[in-house]
Amino acid sequence: MNASNLLPDVTRRGFLAGAGALVVCFAIPAEAQEGEVPSAPGAQTAKPKLPGSLADTPSLDAWIRIDADGSITVFTGKAELGQGTKTSLRQIAAEELEVEPASIRLITADTALTPNEGYTAGSQTIQNSGTAIRYASAQVRQILVAKASEKLGAPVEALKAEAGAILGPNGAKASYGELVSADVLHVDAAADTKLKPPTAYRAIGKPFARVDIPAKVTGGEAYVQDMRPPGMVHARVVRPPSYGAKLTDFADASVKAMPGVIAVVRDGDFLAVIAEQEFQAVRAMRAMAGVAKWQEQPGLPDQYDLPAFLEKSVSEIGTVTSVGADSVPGARTLKAQFTRAYQMHASIGPSSAVAMLDNGLTTVWTHTQGVYPDRKAIAQMLGVPEEKVRCIHTEGSGCYGHNGADDAAADAALIAQKVAGKPVRVQWMRDQEHLWEPYGPAMLTRASATLDQNGNIVSWHYDLWSNSHGTRPGSAGSLIAGRLMARHFPPDPAKLQISPLGNGDRNAIPLYDVPNLRVNWHFIADMPVRVSSLRGLGAYSNVFSIESFMDELALAANADPVEYRLRHLKDPRAKKVIEVAAQKFGWSKDALPEGRGRGFAFAKYKNHAAYLAIALQADVDSDSGTIMVSRVVAAVDCGEAVAPDSIVNQTEGGILQSMSWTLYEAVHFDSTRISSPDWSTYPILRFSTVPDSIEVQVVDNPGTPYLGVAEAAQGPTAGAIANAFRSATGKRIYDLPYTRERVKDALGV
Amino acid sequence: MLKLNVNGTSHDVDVDPATPLLYVLRNDLKLNGAKFGCGLGQCGACTVMVDGKAVFSCLTPAMLVEGREIKTVEGLGTIDAPGPMQKAFIEQQAAQCGYCIAGMMMRAQALLEAKPDAADADIRQALEPNLCRCGTHMRILRAVARARDLMQGKSADNMAPAAATGRG
């Protein structure tokens, strides 16, 4: 089967139909990893670091291809997850190439075609891939201008790029297609490429409708779930009832006799069924679950006493930062402890993948965030070289981090080995996603601060207890199928790593100006509950804690919370978003009606990405224990705003998702089993409690570097809700989520 | 063999009559609009209209809807000629990942067909069974209100439709 039959979107429109021309001459370093900068071959002297992901993949033709007919293709190693990057990356390329965004074909994460940009995570698509594409596009334009200068016999100063051609004096014109030759773009990026000035922008910062929405609202093929390649068969997996359960008996004869069943797959504790039709697979899956007997092991912590579990499980303590003196005298010292439950990604569409083994090559269509790392883990699981696996990103339901995507891809790859030549579609059921996705880890944090006579912070100690927030592939042992299969690949050991990117310690260092500072991560290697990256990682818990604590300090200092934050900040951009949010909200000290409160919070995501300040109003009903957030205003500065409406969309989404985590969400479990298999046992935000209004102000800084924004709202929203509750009731809740029971307990109802 | 009337066309489908309508729509009729979300009637991603009412297609056996009028998001218009509900969602850019959106649109369509002048509060109440995880709720509410206005023939003067850039 020709793979082009299976490729959605751009490729469907004939991109690969001209056969393999693309699979040549891409200078993609095999070992390039996100965040690492390989030194140039043979380089004797240090070169300036190239911008964005060009540092890992410097060759221009890895990013941009121009064909003889003038058509332009842009390649990104990042994936569209619903952030709108299929649109914004086109805008960036179009800006420097002087063409319409719509004329550009964009190929996203595919191990056979695109650069390896690691994971689409950490709000880094525009920051890393966008920056790379921007510089590469600008340099390509300059190369084309130089070529045109030769061809037209005119100086470069007399030439300009416009609509896919270089124009010269007296109507002289050379199209991009005429100017490119075989390897004209097979050159490394230059570090000093000049970009267009913001005053000349035609695409960046301008309103462009998202390219993916029309298909999504008209029933077009938009997701991996929608793929129906010829000959496709349907598979379902059967999972153990709990982590670590062993299959003791499996009498599958009755299942094999069921209508439509093609094969029952058993590999150790890994079970799956392949059937002709989807509902036949579902029925067989249910029958298999009935005949599979498992031996289970208890081993989960007490969900009602997570702080005790976290404190007793520490394997190592890491210093996140240590500045100034350990202990300083002051007028007053305050302390507080905060907790956060295990929480889910809880994608609306359970994970899915399509895989096919053909001529020794296993191709996997997957909504993974990292096609290259996933390929490596899957190849190890299958016991084949990496080049025998190709992973192609295909959109799925929003993931918000490491959900079941990689595991579903591994399931499909493993099952596909049993029916060579047939595309196999795996669709997880709702309970499989809820029970088996890796959750955002439970956390415990403790803050202590000393204030001087004026109420200013002179010392700040902060300790956090947490697992790693990163168990992505990884080895085959990071995949559920890899662990369950007879070879039983072990999980990768968790390691304490403290880096500027942050993990459990993300945003653990307050941006506030504190002369004496101690921050420690009490690291827990043992992971009885499966955990990994959930949008924002530790930033959600840390910013909730820091911002709650800042309000307590402000109260102790008899200061307004907004003024108190401003007086502890030097960074003018931080101050600016706080001022904009406060002003647009109408922040004041005016008394509010009984049960109503206002709350404020701020963070600079990762301390090096977007600035976000938020103010909100909430009403607390003490009888029912419900909190209704009615009005929200946020101000965000993510540097140069490429696609302002997508920034607003992502920020609104972050606010609402964080509101849902904060008000409702906790994974439940007993000593053996997770007991949150569906939406009734893991409720999330519904329309009835959505605020009346959310206003997002984008503070644009044209010409400045892109700062990742998609996760910036997670922490501040929780802090602002906490502070609004405090303002409304005079009480503080220290434990997430703010369930009705906790609200009533806090109010003594 | 079941005879199903979907988006105004009659189809003969050879399936086990107990098969949920969702699987018949997606696999036998190759319609992508209705999505599998939970299979439990808890999230609304699979919502379609049957005789004008919003139903969970994941819970509805195909045999129960024989001879009834089934409508999916594909029945509201096409990518080249979107209907008012679709136009409104595009205009408002009311999607992030978009996975829940077709279900939202069908529930909203059922509301507006039954109550063309639905108030904003009615829209919010009607959408309660449908979950969105990206947090696109504000835009979804705006898009449905906009669809109501479009269906009532109100003009688009206060809207700022963004320039289309293509299809993906």
Image (cartoon, rainbow, N blue to C red):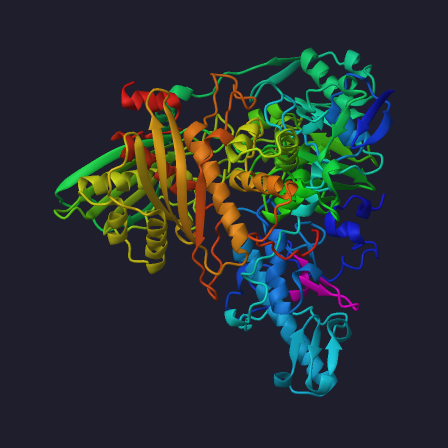
Residue A175 image offset from top left, x and y in percent:
75, 74
What's drawn in magenta, residue-wise?
A60-75
- Position of residue B47 in the picture relative to residue A626 (left or right): right
Q: Quadrant of residue A473?
A: top right
Question: Does the image show residue B150?
Answer: yes
Q: Nearer the viewer, residue A157 or B159?
A: B159
Q: How many marks?
A: 0
Q: Nearer the viewer, residue A608 or A163?
A: A163
Quadrant occupied by the N terminus of chain B: top right
- Position of residue A731 in the picture relative to residue A634 (left or right): left
Q: Write the residue at 38% across / 29% down.
A: A627
Residue A711 image offset from top left, x and y in percent:
47, 45
Residue A299 image offset from top left, x and y in percent:
48, 19
- Residue A453 on the magenta segment: no
Question: Does the image show residue A188?
Answer: no
Q: Nearer the viewer, residue A199 or A432?
A: A199
Residue A41 image offset from top left, x and y in percent:
60, 65
Q: Quadrant of residue A62?
A: bottom right
Above or below, comparing residue B62 to residue A150 in the picture: above
Q: Write the residue at 43% across / 57% down.
A: A699
- Position of residue A556 in the picture relative to residue A196 (left or right): left
